[in-house]
Image (cartoon, helix red, strand yellow):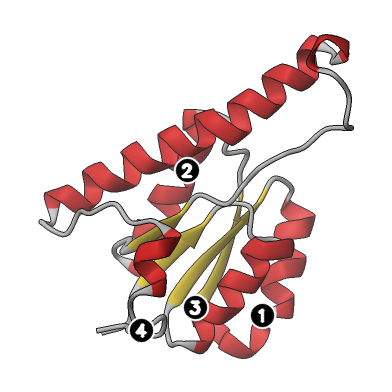
Amino acid sequence: MSKTVVITGSSRGIGFGLAGQFLSCGCRVLVNGRSASTTAEAVERLHPYGEKVRGVAADVSGREGVVLLHREALVHFGAVDIWVNNAGVGHEIRSAWELDEAVIERVLHTNIGGVVHGTIISFLEMRKRGEARSSTWKDLEATDSCSTG
């Protein structure tokens, strides 16, 4: 049986590349971007994979967006086997004291809050199935990256 993968921030860049790699290995993938248009564009670019790819627009800087992604993955694919916290935002390079408070909040909520909520929500569901474990990129390098069994 193929694995289901959710990748936050996967409408472009590294996340999009990861989505393509997981799909080429036979996984089902839920891609995500903040806007409906960029998410739809990503799904369209992955159209050769048909029903194995779904897209959900959600802002993962807050718990609500992460819950939405997780719920949609369960509805469409039945389970979440791998959760990749990839979403992140940047800002122009300036000293911290020069940054606007809104920029600081956006970076913290997305880059830290999104990771924390994504990890907790996905872990708790996987634990219910007795399949929870936390992995790092180093763990993935040590295994066959296309293992779906």
The residue identified by callout 4 is 144
Circles 1, 2 touching at the beta carbon (< 8 Å)? no
Sequence order check, earlier mark of 4 and 2 = 2
Alpha-carbon neighbours of circle 2 within 10 Å: few (<14), some, or many (≥20)?
A: some
The residue identified by callout 1 is 46
Q: Amino acid at mark 2?
A: Leu
Q: Residue at x 16, y 49 (%)?
A: 127
Q: Residue at x 56, y 85 (%)?
A: 50
Q: Amino acid at mark 1?
A: Leu
Tell me which corner region of the image, top left, top right, bottom left or bottom right, holds residue 27: bottom left
On residue 22, which mark appears? 3
Circles 1, 4 touching at the beta carbon (< 8 Å)? no
Q: Amino acid at mark 3?
A: Phe
Circles 4, 2 touching at the beta carbon (< 8 Å)? no
Q: Nearer the viewer, residue 44 or 128?
A: 128
The residue identified by callout 2 is 68
Sequence order check, earlier mark of 1 and 2 = 1
**Is residue 114 placed above or below 99 in the rendered structure?**
below
In x, y percent, where is residue 31?
58, 62
Alpha-carbon neighbours of circle 3 within 10 Å: few (<14), some, or many (≥20)?
A: many
**Residue 18 in view:** yes
Q: Residue at x 44, y 54 (%)?
A: 72
**Is residue 108 placed above or below 65 in the rendered structure?**
above
In x, y percent, where is residue 141?
41, 73
In x, y percent, where is residue 8?
56, 52
Sequence order check, earlier mark of 1 and 4 = 1
